[in-house]
Image (cartoon, rainbow, N blue to C red):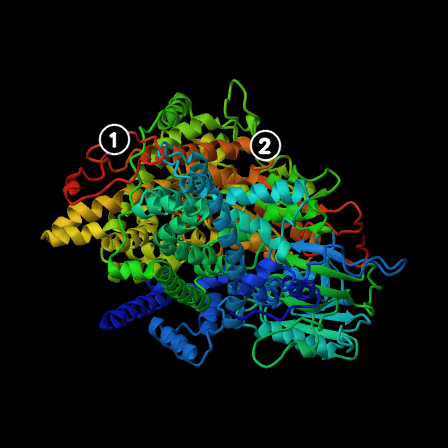
Amino acid sequence: MWQRVAGAGWRTFLAVGLVCGVGLLPWLTSTDPAYTVLKARSAEREPTPEVLADIRRQLGIDGGPLHVLTGWLGGLVRGDAGQSWISGGDVLPDVLRALGASLLLMAVALLVAVLTAGLICARTLRLGARRRLGGRRGGGSASAVLASLPEFLVASVLATVVGVQLGWLPALGWYGPQWTVLPALALGLPAGAVLGRLLDDLLPGAFGEPWALAAAARGLTGRSIARQALRRCVPALLPNLGLFVVGLTGGAVAVEQVFDIPGLGRTTLQAALAQDLPVLQAGTLALVLLAALATGATRVAARLLTGPALRDGALSSLHRPAPPAGGLLPLLYGLVLLAVVGLGLARDPLALDTGQRLRAPSLDHPFGTDALGRDLLARVGHGALDTLLLAAAISAAALLAGVLLGLVPRISAPLVDTVNAVPPVLVALLVTAVAGSGAATPALAVGAVAWAPLAAHTSSLLRQERATLHITATKGLGAGRVHLLRYELLPAVVPPVLRHALLRLPGVALALASLGFLGLGAQPPSPEWGLLLAENQPYAERAPWAVLAPAAVLALLGALAVSAAGGLRRRPAKPSPGTTEAAAGPERRSVAGTEQEPAGVR
Amino acid sequence: MRCRAPARHTPARELHVSVPNLIDPRTMRFHRHPRLLAPFLLVPLMAGCFASGGGDDSGSGGKDGDGDGARLRVALAFPPAEKLSPYGADATLLSRLGVTEGLTSLDANGSAAPALAESWRRDGDKTWEFSLRDATFQDGGEVTPAAVAESLAHATDAEPAPAALAGVDLRAEASGDRVVRITTAEPDPVLPLRLSSPSLAILSKGAYGKGSRVDPVGHATGPFELTEVNGATSASLDRFDDYWGGRAQASGIDARFIADGTARANALRTGELDIAEAVPVAQAASLDKKTRRDTATTRTTSLLLNASSGTFEDAGLRAAARGALDTSVFAEDVYEGYADPAAGVYGPAVTWAEGKRTAPVGRAAAKKAGGATVHLATYDNRPELPEVAQVVKQQLEKAGFTVKLTVREYSRLEGDALDGKFDAFVLARNTLLDTGDPVAVLASDYTCGGGFNIAQLCDKDVDRAVADAEKIADTAKRQDAAMAAEARILGSDAVVPLVHQRIITGVADSVQGVILDPYERTLVGTGTRR
């Protein structure tokens, strides 16, 4: 009982800390809110001292941060979230309206994501239900490509092709159900691909469990076996689903922009840039509350799905059978990527020739040229090193932090929710406030968020792993906590989380680029991949190659990461013979079998 | 979650009808799993979460035959920032939609033209008399001198004061039944120009409630009357039948505020819009040739060189930088022809400027760059500027400078720029500002005491030339003096004009009479129809 109280207390502490942190933002970053508010109202107005003084008086911020914060909190108790500093209108109705639109968008996007995930897992489910998974190689390149597509790119392509050229669905606005389809697809496809990949990663393990064999022998239909396998695997993903719910509600800025949706993402972005604190605080608070609700809901759902088994420690370990050798696929992807980078490095990424702008791919410019006539192959090649090194380093740090914090879910779970609920710009501003705008700040800002889904994944896997029979057995044989962690829990948990981290690597690269407008991260004319995508986005229709080239290498990177990670699985001590046969299968774990090598690198 | 009640034209009604069909007992699947239905019951609730207004892409109102024009569907680039208060940037939005008017307006030559005032005359140094025309407010009242004086008094009392009134102490009073006398503390030779500013629009008494809020809905004098404003999403306007300039041809306007340029262009292409403001250069090619109309604007993109610290403190290096720039590529390539090559501070939209231009005075001889470092900055709110800056960077590097480029969001950059933290800055600047007075921009941008002096220029000759120009009342002579000051400023090489921007307005084929205004103050007028 007291644990639950402590958890709630910790969660409240974080939320209050966050809202106060937001309230102190202008003073932490020493950026005058009167100035940013003036610029948000009217960008061309000269910031003379008299004008700024008038605004300060109007906003009532002469009294300092504490005065402003206590005033706002006092109002909140009475159900009044204050007035927007920019428009002077009441905050609450505006934020609630934006939240309504965002929740609706998120709900439809979630539906799309679930359908996408279902399609991705369909093959595994079908084969698993017929017990023919044995010889299947871990593929999933297509879903990895989908997962690495930037939302804004999917959104602009959908708006232009489906909305404008084909005219099937409205390309703009937010007036009824048919307006939700395209934005939901743009948000839901990449999210669904990530979820589908993670689920597809777990399913073979479930099909390999003894009950599945028994059920098949008993003559249960493949369909009900598949359903039970899903039921077995979904709880591990629920926390991540919860994170998507909150992330899509508050962080869909790009999609809201492309489709002109009056959602919470744009509201909070504008408020963060203008330091419109009442709006920013109300928006953040709404997202944090939503995060708490989502977590509660996923917890209940997880209990409904695997409750008794979790409680009684009656699960078996969810490890898929050892896959056959990784195959040529990762090698192929790697070679293509290397070839592109190698060819690009031999060219000049900065040579401008505005007479050659937006040229289609040709022998001179195999990937075409961008809006300033620079060779895209050269830019992609030269950008690779920066992008990959930094993104890989951030991903590695996030993986480490995620796994470590995932081991102590009581502390990390509320932290995960809170961090995930904060809009990315706000995180960047808060990190800048603390760390200054140095060279490491963008990496810190992205890393501060990137660990959260990994920690959530770790702790949900850990929860299941702790409830397995072999842990009980190992405990019974007198193993200590360290031994359990080192030889049982971590080896079981780390590989899927590592694959998850790799899946998100392209996303990290994109997130880095999205901070550029704050003056953080790569600046033009650097050929960093995220920047390449962003600067060529306006030309997506006229010169599709200009966005396709960086998007394709990013997708290739995703596919490489996932297919190579297919090899990063546990190897059984003695490979069971005849793995291709239907009956071959589950990696029988025994106490003796615990002395396997941990998450090995093939 | 609290959502708005469905507005008139949202599809909520259709949804209400379709829900019961799902619960039809004949549909076995739903019958077996009533739980699955729960989400569908939320559908009518959710309908309230959509944005209201503007959803009718058939064009509500329709064409009711002759005389009663269809409603216009217009997309504006900037949503209202301050609930349509006329004292900030929203003023332009109101005047572009034909809602508000001032006593005067700007004509094509940049001089003051009659609007609510029929004529005016100067009475002594500090006083002007404006004779009003017969006009009515949209709420039915007459536009009387007393009402005008009160409206102007509210503008002078606003905090912060409207930009057009910055540093001006102005008092208006009724004099007789048709005349308003306006007295300023200091002689103000450009008062009629100043009063053309959209932020000095005349509103009726009803617009000013308690407190400082000003509500222009139904209280202005223009040909269109605001009827409904949906936050920062959309607004509806109806024709104001008693407009003094005659009834507008369009029966109303459905305005939408769409911040994303690509989205505006897309909406125009799908026929959801009749007029789309400010189509980005990158999207222009996706519109039909007939659809995109470009107009020269008073906006000039220049490279400002920091004349008081760093590398460009040396006038010789400034001259070297100017010499290194090949400005022809900007208009032609970066702006794809939607800009004019730079001629000076004022571009072709300032129609009188070209005939009065004199050669730059007092230029220094160029020195060798010799690897001097330059910190160049610009902002990404206008997508062309980072591209311009990258070309500038390359050209300067060719001439032997070492250039570092910073690109940020404008509000994160301006403060540093005003503090002189950069050596060079690429800026797109409106050269006629809020008053329409050509001298104002020179005073604020290039004099020692100027409030927007990013070039950090402090030059006695320039200051004197600008001060001379500020004193002149006669329009033509003031323009001559402004050009003399421009020649001094260009001679200092603290500013290198790169291009004069053209603005692209997307106009559907069927629409006629759109006002393409170089000052970006009007867009829809009485003659606009489709």
Crowding at mark 2 (Cα within 10 Å: few <14, some 14-19, many 20+)? many
Q: Which amino acid does label 2 sit on?
A: Asp
* Residue at mark 1 shares a chain with residue at mark 2: no
Q: Taking B1 as reference, is A210 left or right? A: left
Query: Disc 2 on helix, strand or loop?
Result: helix
Residue designated by label 1: A602
Residue designated by label 2: B333
Q: Which mark is residue B403?
A: none
Query: Disc 1 on helix, strand or loop?
Result: loop
- Pick the quarter of the image with the C terminus of chain A: top left
For the residues labelled 1 and 2, the Cα–Cα distance comes to: 52 Å
Outermost front residue: A218
Determine the residue positioned at 39% across, 26% down: A341
Which one is in front, A150 or A530? A150
Q: Taking A111 as reference, is B94 left or right? A: right
- Percent across and percent down for residue B195 are 67, 65
